[in-house]
Amino acid sequence: MLIEMFLVGLALSILKGATLLVSYINNNAFPQPLKESEEAEYLKILADYKEDPKRFPNMYIVENAKNKLIEHNLRLVAHLVKKYEGSGEENDDLISIGTIGLIKGINTYNADKGTRLATYAARCIENEILMYLRSLKKSRGEVSMYDPIGTDKEGNAINLIDVLGTEPDAISDQVESEFEKKAVLDKLKCLSNRERMVIQLRFGLMNSPKKTQREIAKILGISRSYVSRIEKKAVQKLTEEMKDHK
């Protein structure tokens, strides 16, 4: 019964938050952020409730605190959803998912860790949206080689391509099987010097051994994540060039 009540309450919070957010977006009128003292007061109520629910026989105080924190942070959801407008997904869906992330952030926030609520909530919102988009890709069979699957010790995202790239590289095999190496080398002229070097090292062109992104990063003196961005851009350029070669 308690679980059912919790789920109903969560669903209502999400629905209310998403409805309010759409209204605020349409009217371009978001509530002002809470004052620091107000936010601290509402957060203390939630923290006290987590510690000892019996102290709050009247749940109105707890629900009011939570709703105030949700309502006055909805602008975060609107701001982050804009980053994914080109994802092809319905804006209303992203708003609902972002609102779930905001509610999760407020429910799990711990002021003792020293992170501001807005910073923590923004991370939760974005994580929720990214998980949603990845689940859609997987259900549609659209998993990207560049989708993050974790982080390394330095906090850099690790992509599928990094894991697969340590063996005979999937993309390299695709390039070599579909196009003659001579044609590939000719198409490298469309790349910048740095892009060309990354591709040559990554896929073993010009008789050089294939290298991982981390190895290339050490050679060029840049971060692995930057190598990943250069490679992605270069592959996109080459893909366009290769269309004329088919």
Image (cartoon, helix red, strand yellow):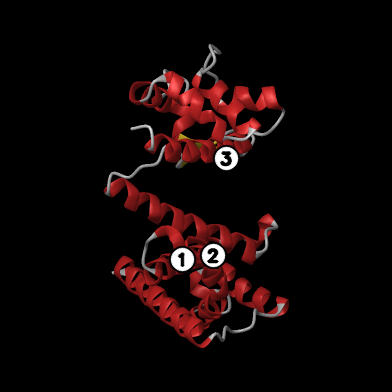
Residue 238 lies, with reference to residue 85, above or below; the image says: above
Residue 36: mark: none
Q: Residue at x 44, y 34 (%)?
A: 160
Q: Is disc 3 surrounded by few (<14), some (14 to 19) or many (20+) residues within 10 Å?
A: few
- The amino acid type, in three-letter code, at marker 3 is Arg
Q: Is residue 4 left or right of residue 155?
A: left
Residue 116 lies, with reference to residue 38, above or below; the image says: above
Mark 2 touching mark 1, by CB under 8 A? yes
Image position, residue 97 (x, y; %):
41, 65
Q: Quadrant of residue 8?
A: bottom left
Q: Is disc 2 surrounded by few (<14), some (14 to 19) or many (20+) residues within 10 Å?
A: some
Residue identifier under label 1: 98
Q: CA distance from mark 2 to mark 3?
A: 21 Å
Q: CA distance from mark 3 to mark 1?
A: 26 Å
Q: Residue at x 53, y 24 (%)?
A: 202
Q: Earlier in the sequence, mark 2 or mark 3?
A: 2
Residue identifier under label 2: 80
Q: Nearer the viewer, residue 173 or 193?
A: 193
Local secondary structure at mark 2: helix
Local secondary structure at mark 1: helix
Image position, residue 157 (x, y; %):
55, 39
Q: Earlier in the sequence, mark 3 or mark 1?
A: 1
